Amino acid sequence: MLKLFEYNWQVRQDWFAWCQDVSEEELLKKRTGGIGGI
C-alpha cells in the first residue's frame, strides 16, 4: 500500500511540475472532451 501511495504522490508532483512549465494561456485554452480545459 505504501508503494502505491508513493507512486500516486510522485505522479501528482510530476503533474504540478508540468503545469508550471505551460503558459496560463495554454492551460486555459478551450478544449474538446471532459470539462473543456485542463
Image (cartoon, helix red, strand yellow):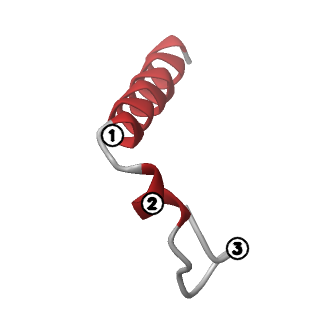
Mark 2 vs mark 3, CA separation in Å: 17 Å
Q: Tell me the kind of residue under disc 2.
A: Glu
Q: Tell me the kind of residue under disc 3.
A: Ile
Residue 1, position in %: x, y?
A: 56, 18
Residue 37, position in %: x, y?
A: 59, 69
The secondary structure type at the circle numbered 1 is helix
Q: Is residue 5 above or below residue 15?
A: above
Observer-nearest of 15 and 23: 23
Label 2: which residue?
A: 25
Label 1: which residue?
A: 18
Label 3: which residue?
A: 35
Quarter assignment of residue 3? top left
Residue 27: give its label: none
Mark earlier in primary sequence (2, 3): 2
Residue, x 64% and y 77% (percent of image)?
36
Residue, x 37% and y 50% (percent of image)?
23
